[in-house]
Amino acid sequence: MNSFAKELKLIADGLLIQQADEKIDSKPNYTDSDFLNIILIFQLALMDKMYDLQLREQMNEEDMTNMARNCGQELRKFIKTYTNLDTVELVNNYRQDYSQ
């Protein structure tokens, strides 16, 4: 599976350089679609690292599933709390935008 490591490094470097060059009060003005893309990338990386932990801990399948579900629910709650955006709604809107 492609990890897109080079592309992720380019994006991260570009964002850090942009942030360093911008004024303190500037912001990137991400759209909801942009934000969802960022969340999806983060969530995939988080799940990858969580799976590594689960294997090291020799967790059974039921515990692994519960841990993944809890992680997703906590991430959704965190995003809702600090942005007032519901990730389920973002995904549904994304699907509607691209199914037309």
Image (cartoon, rainbow, N blue to C red):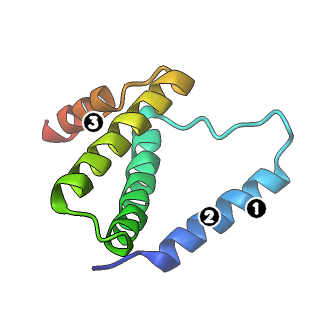
Q: Is residue 66 left or right of residue 37?
A: left
Residue corresponding to mark 2: 12
Q: Amino acid at mark 1?
A: Ile
Point out the frontmost of discs 3 and 1.
3
Q: Which numbered marker is on residue 17?
A: 1
- Tag 3 or tag 2, which sits nearer the N-term? 2
- Tag 1 or tag 2, which sits nearer the N-term? 2
Question: Percent from the top left, x then y, of residue 78?
Answer: 49, 31
Location of residue 93 (image quadrant): top left
How many residues crowd mark 1 within 10 Å: few (<14), some (14–19), many (20+)? Answer: few
Question: Percent from the top left, x then y, of residue 87?
Answer: 35, 32
User: What residue appears at the point 34 percent right and 35 percent down from the top-left corner?
Assistant: 73
Location of residue 17 (image quadrant): bottom right
User: What residue appears at the point 33 percent right and 41 percent down from the top-left corner?
Assistant: 70
Q: Is residue 36 left or right of residue 17?
A: left
- Please tell me whether residue 78 is drawn above or below residue 68 in the rendered image: above
Q: Amino acid at mark 2?
A: Ala
Labelled pair 3, 1 in contact (Cβ < 8 Å): no
Residue corresponding to mark 3: 91
Between residue 39 and residue 46, name the one nearer to us.
Answer: 46
Location of residue 71 (image quadrant): top left
